[in-house]
Image (spheres, grey):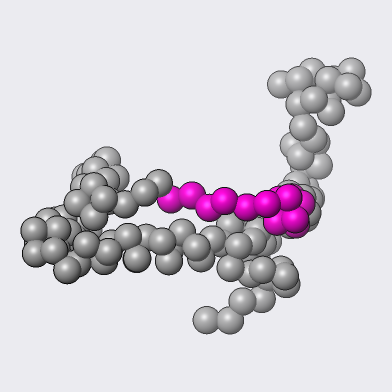
Amino acid sequence: MTDQNGSRKPGFSFSLTEDWLKGLHRNDQIRLDTLVGLVSGWGDDATRDDVIAALDALAEALQSPREGELDMLTDEIESAAAMDWPQTEFGLADAVRLRDELDAVIEQLARFNPAAAVLPAQRAAEGRDAA
């Protein structure tokens, strides 16, 4: 799996799909934290059994999921493994870099409708409707 997005930090970045029709947000830290959280209690038999049972239920539901079922079963896995919220802290340097990457993505996504990329505050400042 090669990363072609050109970011200085491809594992925590914004980019475009190959066809430039959708944006991508990559956050490898969340995947790492998820896997570590999932197996952190693996040494405890009760925790391991609860996690395995929740994973089995999710695997079974994937065959023909009902609406909301996958979210519910994923929540059960996170609960059984006592996992934290999937979030990543970042500082100013990353915030500025991510903003620049996201601005580039927005510019490409809005290439056929540039007005859609204008923020409501900008529209209001220019005297247009803020809707």
Q: Nearer the viewer, residue 36 or 52?
A: 36
Residue farthest to the bottom? 2
Q: Is residue 26 visible?
A: yes
Where is residue 124 drawn, in percent x and y?
83, 20
Q: Is residue 81 left or right of residue 123?
A: left
Residue farthest to the right? 126
Q: Is residue 75 above or below residue 98?
A: above
Q: Is residue 94 magenta?
A: yes
Q: Is residue 59 magenta?
A: no
Write down the region rendered in magenta. Answer: 86-99
Q: Is residue 53 visible?
A: no
Q: Nearer the viewer, residue 101 or 129?
A: 101
The residue drawn where x is 63% and y is 52% is 90
Where is residue 106 drawn, in percent x and y?
73, 49
Where is residue 127 drawn, in percent x and y?
89, 18
The image quadrant that residue 113 belongs to is top right
Task: Name the quadrant of the C terminus.
Answer: top right
Where is residue 85 drawn, in percent x and y?
40, 46
Q: Is residue 6 left or right of residue 76?
A: right
The residue drawn where x is 37% and y is 60% is 34
The residue drawn where x is 56% and y is 62% is 26
- How many labels, in total? 0
The image quadrant that residue 120 belongs to is top right
The residue drawn where x is 31% and y is 52% is 83
